[in-house]
Image (spheres, rainbow, N blue to C red):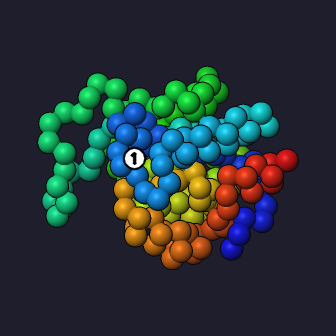
Amino acid sequence: MPVTTLDATTALVLIDLQKGIVGLPTVPVPAAEVIEGGARLAAAFRARGLPVVLVNVTGGTPGRTESARPAGDPPADWAELVPELGRQPGDLTVTKQTWGAFHGTDLDRELRRRGVTQLVLGGIATSIGVESTARAAYEHGYHVTLATDAMTDLDADAHRNSLERIFPRLGETGTTEEVLTLLG
């Protein structure tokens, strides 16, 4: 369902827009465009006094997987949020160790303290961090909106699957412009 409305207390959640991830090859949307859309959304949310949540990842869940994991330590600035987001002192910052921003963090508690009932999500990667966070947000009872042009993936098919099959079951989708229009 296309985005129809934003609740009075909607928060923006931008996932993994950090130096080590935005440098990876993304499709179908270049990371630079995702960063630009995220920055525009963040500025608009801040201008209206609405919460902005900036999420980064610094680790990974242990366990066996069939996908190879990077060897060695990441560069020192790997987890730093990109400066284009214009991080402000009032922004909530969440550092996670798993794909989703809810598990093992205080995100739900912090959102509820602020009276948040809806989340607008964007970031990298659509099928990993964004989708995992959207699923958990839905399960926690938040209205979920996904800014489809403010997210991208490492795999075009996985991105498309999230947009076409998963996200319509979790909430509403819309472009950055559509979300900005609803913000007024």
Please identify the residue farthest to the right as the structure is shown: 184
Q: Is residue 46 above or below residue 30?
A: above
Secondary structure type for disc 1: loop
The image quadrant of residue 113 is top right
How many callouts does the rendering have? 1
Name the residue nearer the viewer: 33 or 51.
33
The answer to whether residue 113 is seen in the rendering is no
Q: Is residue 80 left or right of residue 66?
A: right
Residue positioned 37% across, 62% down in the render: 155
Residue positioned 48% across, 49% down in the render: 30
Circle 1 is placed at which residue position? 104
Q: Is residue 73 left or right of residue 154?
A: left
Q: Is residue 181 above or below residue 43?
A: below
Q: Indicate the quadrant containing the N terminus: top left, top right, bottom left or bottom right.
A: bottom right
Q: Is residue 70 left or right of residue 90?
A: left
The image quadrant of residue 145 is bottom right
Horizontal and vertical percent for residue 62?
A: 20, 51
Horizontal and vertical percent for residue 109?
A: 56, 44
The image quadrant of residue 42 is top right
Residue positioned 72% across, 40% down in the render: 45
How dense is the environment of label 1, judged by Cα within 10 Å: few (below 14), some, or many (20 and up)? few
Residue positioned 43% across, 36% down in the render: 18
Q: Is residue 130 above or below residue 66?
A: above
Which residue type carries mark 1?
Gly
Name the residue nearer the viewer: 169 or 127.
127
The answer to whether residue 1 is seen in the rendering is yes
Q: Is residue 90 above or below residue 45?
A: above
Horizontal and vertical percent for residue 119?
A: 64, 53
